[in-house]
Amino acid sequence: MNTIVRNDELIAQIGESGLPPYNGARNFGYLKVGVTRAMTEIKLPIHVVSGVEPGPTVLVQGAAHGNEIAGSIGILNLLENIDPEQLSGTVIAVPVLNVLGFEMGVRLSPADGKDILASFPGNIDGSITEQISYHYFRNIVMQADVLLDFHQGGRTAYERYILIDAPQNENQWNNMEMNRLSLAVVFGLSAVAYFPPGTFAENQSDVLIDNNIIHLTPELSGGTGWYVNNRRDIRDAEQGILNILWSLDMVSEPPIYRQRYCDVYDAGNVVWKSNEDGLFVRNAKFGEEVEAKGTYGKLMNPYTGELIAELKTERKGIVIPSGQEWPTIGNTSVGILGDVVQVIDRESADLKVSLL
Ligand SMILES: [Zn+2]
């Protein structure tokens, strides 16, 4: 393990004084971000790896949802392996963002049921998640040019793509959106999926766009296959960060990809299950095209095997690597359909991004 200098004071001052100089140091500290109603002080673990040359600032965070931890382990591995002497710019790393949810093994904060990202830019006088959001956003997030926010399907869902909550509408695209797509592709997963803003409440990122922060949400599997997939997912988290650092000219090592092509999806078609409860079993395969009113899956009684309902798709589309395979209760999303609007060849595409 590389030597880490514990320096809470330096971390606390970032909001006022900015990031430390490009001196090749690795600093770590706990940032005080709020107090619960029972007077427990909450602190976030913040690593700052300073390169030796000027460059962009990339913020990587894990476990914004407390039970989505492949990214957290990938980030810890990156911290162990990264060499500040070979780095330009700064990497800020927060292995666990939702510390209360992480401790309880649940998605949201068990203290107030809220989501830190959805609470940006926070409220200093609000509930604990709003306080965390306030201090984290002002002191740490505002330093970043790029925010990589690691997620996965948690315990019951599988999701594997880079999620972007913006319309895939080229007329509206500016330079920042072009850069966002390049960074999403360079990360290395087989799919990038654009969702209309507001599809998932927790992914509202207007405040990040307003502050010129490029926001990417890698979804790294999860679900009941966690122990099958986790080595790959953890490795993909670390390699994806390194690929992005290469794209931004922060490291010189060339990117490594698992696959050459990246499918870019318009992913407006979330398959919502009706209110019936049951064990969901998907028929449609990832990457398969499903016709309108085609069978996406079924709901079964998990004890008798009786069919409760067949789930039909609203419209034609390709099955994005996503879904639930577990008893689903109430009106939940069980999968996502999309249209492939672009296939990017990583070998021939120019995936270098300049933020100047
Ligand atoms: Zn999540």
Image: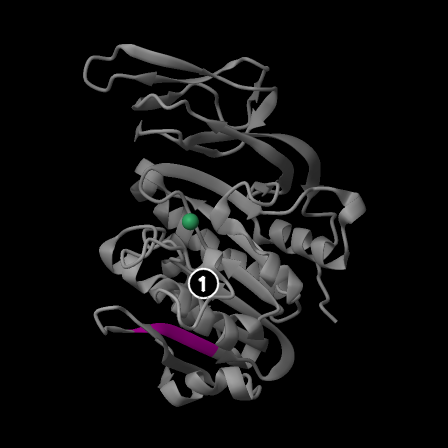
Q: Is residue 76 left or right of residue 290?
A: left
Farthest residue in the left direction?
303
Does 66 appear above or below 44? above
Q: Which residue is mark 1?
A: 61
Secondary structure of residue under mark 1 = strand
Residue 173 in the figure: left or right of residue 123: right
Q: Residue at x 41, y 75 (%)?
A: 46
* Relative image position of residue 154 (x, y in whole percent): 35, 45
Inspect the magenta stretch and tell me whether residue 46 lies in it. yes
Residue 354 at what x, y percent from top left?
A: 73, 66
Amino acid beneath label 1: Gln
Q: Position of residue 234 (x, y in %)?
A: 40, 53
Any magenta on residue 308?
no
Q: Quadrant of residue 126?
A: bottom left
- Residue at x 57% of width, y 71% of height: 144
Q: How is the image coloured?
A: one colour
Q: Taking the image as drawn, is residue 96 in sight?
A: no
The residue at label 1 has a CB less than 8 Å from ligand 1: no
Residue at 34% x, 66% y is 128
Res 216 quadrant in image: bottom right
Looking at the picture, tell me which residue is in the foreground, 222 or 166.
166
Q: Give the extent of the magenta segment.
A: 42-48
Q: Position of residue 232 (x, y in %)?
A: 41, 47
